[in-house]
């Protein structure tokens, strides 16, 4: 068995996706994993975000203190979770920019065989929550990683009336953010972090060069 090393990459403005990331990190640590919790670079200016909201100011103070994620954080880990707020049914631009930035890892095959999982936060219940989770999982598949979701043996997944899904951890905050993140959503996020930490112990990274495979002609 390997030591479990989990990297959590988060983008968040009002703090709800960040709350999920913290719960995921706690869950991973509860399984003995070493955890790196990192942020992505915010692309300024963001015209659509209300920077006068108190929850924005509170969350950004914590968010900006996190280390900025880099390719080495993904290479170091054997379990990787990434998440962002939903934007028009998709992941956010800053997280997408980070995924583009680590493209050299794809060429190297550096993430092949690692465990990947996703999380998100939406304003609405039926306006992209699960679609964002699914789209966040697709780059992991392109990297040759093994996907982890949330099994229905997690009781809060059966009882949630807001976020949390078999496809990953999530929150439904209401369009003005006032519904926040509830106990079930946090418990599901913790369970996902713990599960990735457990699975990461068993996987054997399979480093292999994608470029060499392409040039071998096989
Ligand atoms: C530009 C923009 C687009 C958004 N698009 C969606 C959307 O498609 N569906 C949805 O439910 N919420 C949408 N939201 C709301 C956010 O996803 C929601 O507020 C989220 O909980 C914020 O997460 P955070 O607290 O981590 O910043 C959007 C918000 C903004 C600013």
Image (cartoon, rainbow, N blue to C red):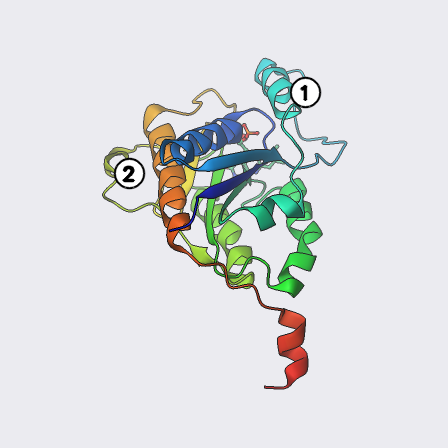
Rendered image quadrant of residue 24 = top left
Front in this rendered view, residue 131 or 4: 4
Residue 84 locus on image (x, y percent): 56, 38
In this rendering, position of residue 159 left or right of residue 218: left
Q: Residues within 10 Å of mark 1 (few under 14, many from 20)?
A: some
Q: Is residue 33 left or right of residue 13?
A: left
* Residue behind mark 1: 51
The image shows residue 125 at horizontal and vertical percentages of: 41, 37
Residue where numbered disc 2 is placed: 157
Q: Secondary structure at mark 1?
A: loop
Dot 2 crowding, Cα within 10 Å, few <14, some 14–19, many 20+:
many
Camera-side residue of 47 and 83: 83
For the residue pair 61 and 6, the one nearer the viewer reads as 6
Q: Position of residue 78 (x, y in %)?
A: 49, 49
- Circles 1 and 2: CB distance less than 8 Å? no
Q: Residue furthest bottom?
A: 218
The mark total stands at 2
Q: Find ligand 1 in the image and state its quadrant.
A: top right
């Amino acid at each position: 068995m390997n030591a479990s090393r989990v990297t959590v990459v988060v983008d968040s403005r009002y703090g709800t996706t960040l709350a999920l990331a913290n719960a995921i990190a706690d869950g991973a640590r509860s399984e003995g994993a070493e955890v790196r919790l990192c942020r992505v670079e915010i692309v300024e200016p963001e015209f659509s975000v209300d920077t006068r909201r108190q929850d924005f100011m509170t969350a950004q103070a914590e968010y900006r203190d996190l280390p900025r994620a880099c390719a080495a954080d993904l290479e170091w880990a054997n379990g990787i979770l990434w998440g962002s707020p939903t934007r028009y049914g998709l992941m956010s631009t800053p997280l997408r920019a980070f995924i583009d930035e680590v493209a050299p890892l794809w060429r190297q095959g550096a993430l092949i065989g690692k465990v990947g999982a996703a999380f998100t936060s939406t304003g609405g219940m039926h306006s992209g929550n699960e679609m964002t989770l699914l789209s966040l999982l697709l780059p992991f598949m392109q990297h040759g990683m093994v996907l982890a979701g949330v099994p229905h043996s997690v009781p809060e997944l059966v009882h949630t009336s807001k976020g949390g899904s078999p496809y990953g951890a999530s929150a439904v905050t209401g369009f003005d953010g006032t519904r926040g993140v509830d106990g079930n959503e946090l418990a599901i996020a913790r369970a996902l972090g713990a599960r990735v930490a457990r699975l990461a112990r068993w996987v054997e990274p399979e480093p292999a060069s994608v470029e060499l495979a392409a040039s071998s002609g096989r």
